[in-house]
Amino acid sequence: MPRRLFAISSLLFLAVLAVSPAKNALRPYRAIQREYRRLGLARARSLKAAEAYRQRPVAIQQIWLPSLGNRVDRCTSCHLGVSDPAMAEVSQPFRLHPRTAHTADDLDRFGCTSCHGGQGLATAEADAHGSASDAGPPMLPATHLEAGCGRCHADETVPEAPMLSRGRALMARYNCFACHTARGREGFRPDAPPLDSLPVKTGGEWVRRWLRDPKALDPNATMPRFELADQETEALAQYLFSASVPRDLSRRVSQAEQEPKGDAANGKRLFSEGRCISCHTVEGKGNGSAPELSTIATAATRGWLLSFLRDPHAFYPQTRMPQYHFSESESRDVVAYMEEELRDFQAPKGLLDPLPVNQTLAETGRRLFQRYGCFSCHAPTKAGERFGPDLDGIGDKKAASLDFGRRSDLPRNLPAWLGAKLEAPRSFAQGLRMPSFAFGAFDRRAVVTALLSLSAQPVPAAYLRSAAPQPSMLPGGPVGALIAQYRCLSCHRIGDQGGDLSTAPLAAEGSKVKREWLVDYLVTPYTMRPVLEERMPVLRMPRDEAAKLADAIESFYVDPRVPEDPFAGRPSADGDAGEGQRLYVTLGCRACHQLSNAGGYYGPPLTDSARRLKPGWVYTWLKGPQRWRADVRCPDYGLTDTDALRLTAYLETQTAPPAGAASAGGAR
Amino acid sequence: MRRRSLSILLPLALAACSRHGAAPAAATPSPATPPLPPYEVRMGQAVYQRYCETCHGTTGAGDGFNAFNLDPHPRDLSDPAFQKKKADVDLTDAVQRGGAGVGLSPLMPPWGRTLSKRELADVVLYVRTLARPAQPR
């Protein structure tokens, strides 16, 4: 009896031992590799290629990257055709890797999971792609694939990843990092106005409406909707009106309130010359990075509008709005225009009436201001502590660790959870405080992509890609003060500082334009590119300030690559303007540029190039426009030195002021 | 005693071997969002919008902002007959060498030195998506 039992158990033991090799022999990847061999043989164009397919061993393929977190990717055990051009249109898993920024040629450097996510070690589909419930974070879905780029590419803009870049830009614009921190965003400075002058800016009813839904009053608003109860709205409004307005500001506003009414017609002219819509919008037309102005006179008191326009930086030190050099009466004219035309004619009376403060309610409001984290944007603390949870590692969260709360309708995965958090943050449970940002479906997808790029562990330094900060190129002293007053950096780039509204970075401006022209242009700018809504505003800059700025630009912002005289040491035939004219025609420059009353409006007009541009710059530009900025639209024609010089010589003969240049700025 | 230990060990051993047989959790698609064109097409669209749209227009009809200045007018890229006539290499060649390079108007500049090979291929791929459906005659 014991002997028989022993025999049976031995047999069973053998059977159990055999399970493992049998399972290995039956692993799906082996069948897949045999199928790939058949497919390759069917598609092979030569005997040699066919032989290569035939001789492929059936074995696990892996990429081992000790320097990238000891990553082991076995994805190519099934995805055998990733770098095989013969597999361009076959179905997965054999398809050739698409032609992206990193192609299959980069496999040995990055592997697969560093971009795509998923479990590199696994060889069964469900485990590798991460849809098995006990696996790690799953692969990134195709819609959010660019999140993978963001693991190494840390800059806000990643040219090859437009969706990621858009998401990151939205996260900065909507001040996400004011409440949440993330690696590299510790020093983020939110862009929101201080609230201490609110009681002299607007009225109680307007504040209530704004708190209920900022986007309903201003489609460009970046402030989210906090879904407040009516009592909460009232208490917050009370608190905001209990603030003590700095005495200097309230005096300015009350004095401005007493001033006589200006000339609305002149104000309208100043408003359009001021190119307010380069940042603001009026009925949706304009850039939209600053508030919509079509109802501004309904939102703010006359006194505030006047005193803000005269000195915006006193009310809102971080604003991107320049201080226009309007005279007292000119600013009255602009505000008169706003009161006449930029108002909501259907708005009820009393929107701007001040709110009598009830101290008890105001105290409740103060607590709500803390509770909802309003201070994060409007009164950030010096220490910079953050109100909301840390976002590092949010892209690596496992679905099992997420709190779906009441949202039983959602698919149990991270992208869906993040999307719902953005769409309806309060729907998960009671008492949540995150406000809703009213992103459209596309923007939400972009922000989710940016969130998924935030990994728990940073990639090794050798893999991290981000632009090194450049030393500041901003001058101090009176010129620095002028640059700050006119907020040049709100639109222009100097080095790695400043905004990107203008197409003209200023770091080489001194090598580009002639000083006399620049002074005139700063005093009365004219339209360089009618195709753009964003144009240089007429800032009413006095001539002496313009001269000071032009002198500084002429001496600081020069580029050593631009020769002073490109014709020096060249044969005189190179300066043949007639040949240059012929080239101008045969190359088709007039498709984009205006010259002799003909041509396109895409590039800047060239009618006054002799007055505007330095010949050294024209020559260097023609030799390679993309040297100044990679995305310059002027095509590189690959001109010879002689051709570039002849064109330069031809443009040096053009002196007529462009049409509309004199009238655009008005007589001044 | 021996029998009992076997009856415990056997299911355990089998269970250990059968982990990979576990049914995968149902993969649920993410909530409804408009379908995204392939990456290459999206990159091509970005190139098109930056360099081509001003003349050739948003839909490729040759009616961009700058088109009215141009004589001859920019090509209507959405014309199905044109799309059918030209192979990808022809389109790439025209973008690369410009109008003058292929015996047409020099107002179409050569982009071969400005755009990378990948950008060229992507923009041709996007131009293909601009074709209007052919009108039945």
Image (tube, rainbow, N blue to C red):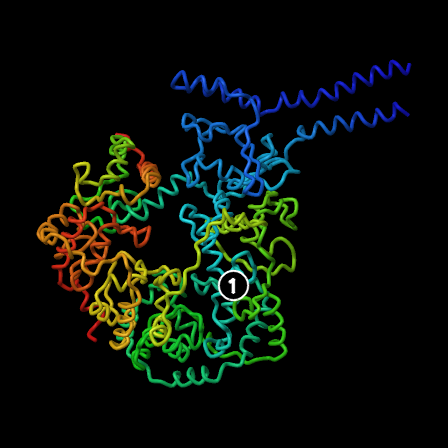
Q: Quadrant of residue B7?
A: top right
Q: Residue at x 47, y 70 (%)?
A: A193
Considering the image in quadrants, where does the N terminus of chain A appear? top right
Residue A60: quarter of image: top right
On screen, residue A433 versus residue A172, left or right, reads right
Q: Position of residue A223 (x, y in %)?
A: 49, 63
Picture quarter containing residue A288?
A: bottom left
Q: Is residue B87 visible?
A: yes
Query: Residue at left 41%, top 25%?
Result: A86
**Residue B23: x and y, percent?**
66, 31
> For the residue labelled by badge 1, is the local secondary structure a helix, a strand or a loop?
loop
| Residue A180 in the figure: left or right of residue B104 | right
Q: Residue A123: x percent and y percent?
A: 59, 30
Left or right: A598 as drawn, with respect to A418? left
Q: How would you rate the neighbour count of disc 1 (Cα within 10 Å): few for under 14, some for 14-19, many for 20 or more?
A: few
A404, above or below A373, in the image: above
> In terms of depth relative to the viewer, which is nearer, B74 or A569?
A569
